[in-house]
Image (cartoon, rainbow, N blue to C red):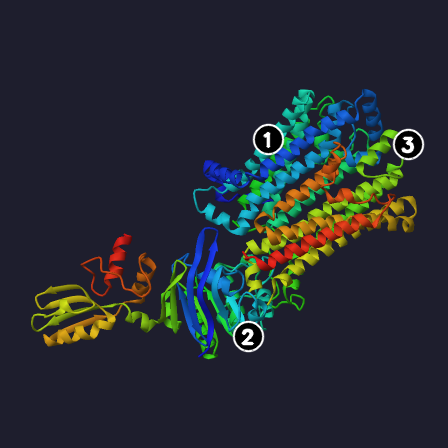
Amino acid sequence: MTAVTLPAAARTGGSHDLAGTGALLRLALRRDRLMIPAWVVLLGLTVVSMSGALEKLYDTPAKRADVASSMTGNGSLRAVYGPVFDDSLGGLTAWRIGCMAALLAGVMSLLIVVRHTREEEETGRQELLSAAMVGRRAPLTAALLAALVADAALALLIAAGLAGAGQPAGGALALGLAVGGTGLVFAGLAAITAQLTESARAAKGLAGAALGAAFVLRAAGDAATEDASSPLTWASPVGWAEQLRAFADERWWVLLLFLAGTAVTVGAAYALTARRDLGMSFLPARPGPARASASLNGATGLAWRLQRTTLLGWSAGFLLAGAVFGGITDGASDLVGDNEQARRIFERMGGQQGLSEAFISALTGMLGMVAAIYAAGAVLRLRGEETGDRAEPVLAGAVGRLRWAAGHLAIAFLGTVVVLLLGGLGLGLTYGLTIGDVSGQLGPATGAALAQIPAVWTLTGLAVLLVGALPKASAGTWAVVGCCLGIGWVGPAVQLPQWAMNLSPFSHLPKLPGGEATAAPFLWLLALTAVFVTAGLTALRRRDIG
Amino acid sequence: MTKAITVSGLRKAFGRTQALDGLDLDVEAGEVHGFLGPNGAGKSTTIRVLLGLLRADGGGAHLLGKDPWRAAVELHRRIAYVPGDVTLWRNLSGGEVIDLYGRLRGGLDKARRADLLERFELDPTKKGRTYSKGNRQKVALVAAFASDVDLLILDEPTSGLDPLMEEVFQDCVEEERDRGRTVLLSSHVLSEVEALCDRVSIIRKGRTVESGSLADLRHLTRTSVTAELAGAPNGLSGLPGVHDLDIQGHRVRLQVDTDKLDAVLRSLSRSGVRSLTSTPPTLEELFLRHYQDDTLDGTQTPEPAASAPVAGSGSGSGSEKAALR
């Protein structure tokens, strides 16, 4: 966009463009009155509780120094967590959870912004609002302010929580601002993608891909250098969260990067929004075929048509992630083999046997938990079709409820297999290539990834149960998936009691490769899945639609 | 004639809201049946029960002789449905949606599809979101009229169409009738109902308040009569069914229940008629009476409330219009 002339509305600027922002902001906060507090509280408390957990784990300065040096000395681990800048308790907390919290703050912010901008336009609700006393820039401003409220609350909660737990106030504030600042940058980025695409789904996908790229840049930069001095790390907003160096002689000027990043992205989004019409986008829809192809032959064909692009994106993402993980796996065994501290860390990450195997096991476990996000989304499409009034005309055709659901469910369940298979293959392939043993590694890595399926399916089945039996609560699937992710990612580190760990189906899986696999947990999880799906579908057949 | 739709005593509640409260509906095979009622009366709920999307709490419903809940799939092969608010998939073109709907029913007549696209002036290559409301409705209408079905259920199908397209729509419904198909038409466009429907059912608050041909329904309401007489009128006030009698010298204005018109005319002619105007109630008055009156029960006509009606309008509607202001 190099046009010099601005549309009249953009030229005049001023307060008219922002008319109604306050009302829209209140509307946004009212609509998100559950979502924003849930994100902020869960994420904030996870960060705060991490310091307490690490205090128990590494109770002497010697232990902390040991873990700091062994973690920072290994490129693969730096890729996952980043380097340890300070071996104080606060420093370890920032190292262990800082990147992940920043990443999740980004996810929260992009969801909020797209939800109140492109999604409103896509559904046509914005048209009604914009016809009232609402300025041209008001919707975007209100969405960004809603994200600001959430990010500021998160930053405050982290800063106050950590300071309250006895950590240095400066470091606590720095970590909170690093997390909230990353969130703001991605709010700005989502504001741009919301101008580019016509669908909210695509806008979230684009912003999510940018978030993934930021994480990979940071991981690559940290793998390459021990002190995070790589330009790759500096190029990533997630890297900035690290560069602020909370609890390690904070570099406050890094906050300017967050400010600049937010200002540039937000400015670009405003420029774009001034140059387009309501509901339109810069990547407009092309005309489609006048006749339907033979494959669009019924409910299943329709489900495939609606979900194939999403599955393709996830498949590519998993293949890529697997390949990246495989590439850094060999480095993990560079660690001194008999370093007891490192071994224990690995075990807490999920591994049991040799370091490489433990590393692969931890990474495939991560792939499995992320695959649950895909599967839940695929099942919830059913509910989306229903609430979007698109299910009604299909069910008014010669399509039974089960036929209608079957297509989407097949994509959810089989799609899980596809993405995990690709993730496992990518991991096994690049790991095999780096150690010159492709044939020996492809099988175990793929097997370890596929072993996640029963746990993913259990959550998929739960989504089916909710959509069928408690449709109004079906969004609760995300809460369950989120909790399982939290249990899997930080549960071992914060030493959750076993009963709490057991709530997640992933905790029942054997640690593969290397661990001992018995049929029992798989069968139990599959049986539970079958019960969930049967109950959900039975309820779906009996209930009202819409 | 066989019944295409029979509904008796249908009940459906959503939480505390009683959406359907003993609704009756009879649609003969091969007729175009108007389904009328104010917003929130339960028209769409009835239709969604008939489509097997909602499960009735009580009462009976039969479609083409079958239970719409149990035999949903089998029935839907023979039914085409057009919702009032058509939502399309954003990444599917209109043509694809038309074909998909056809395949979900008994099949699609290709020649008729092409013909309808031309008559409705619809571009089938545009994608879901880019259609206007009227064009989205056209997508659903083309799919319905081109489908090979026995029964069409149309829920306010023309609310977004322009007058030219409204005419095309009416032609299409006429053609469906000529081909022996049954149409259940829920609509607020009274001219459309008058032009198309053989019979109508009017519902209010989940109950049927009136059912029959338009002529039947007119019969149940009042006709306005204005007459210039040769002599003084005599005995009019004593006649049954006369309301709002207003005599000024030899000039008479009155409202009369339409089935009692005969006696009034005989009484008038006894005094010698110089001029006579008799105005049947307009359709609007007919419906407004049913839509507005809260105390209405079944076929009973309301008591006159205003004594100075405007000529040519029923006293009931006159008073209710006044009450609305």
Q: Residue furthest front?
A: B58
Query: Around disc 1, counting alpha carbons within 10 Å, would you say few (fewer than 14), some (14 to 19), or many (20 or more)?
Result: some
Residue B129, given in percent of the width and then of the height, sits at: 55, 57
Marks 3 and 1: CB-CB under 8 Å? Answer: no
**Which quadrant is the N terminus of chain A positioned in?**
top right
Amino acid type indicated by mark 3: Val
Residue A146, given in percent of the width and then of the height, sits at: 55, 37
Amino acid type indicated by mark 2: Asp
**Left or right placement of residue A464 versus residue A518 in this view:** left
Distance between the Cα atoms at labels 3 and 1? 42 Å
Marked residue chain, label 3:
A
Q: Nearer the viewer, residue B273 or B16?
A: B16
Amino acid type indicated by mark 1: Ala
Instruction: Give the numbered dot on residue A153.
Output: 1
Q: Residue at x 72, y 23 (%)?
A: A247
Give the labeled residue for mark 3.
A336
**Secondary structure type for disc 3:** loop
Distance between the Cα atoms at labels 1 and 2? 59 Å
Q: Nearer the viewer, residue A360 or B52?
A: B52
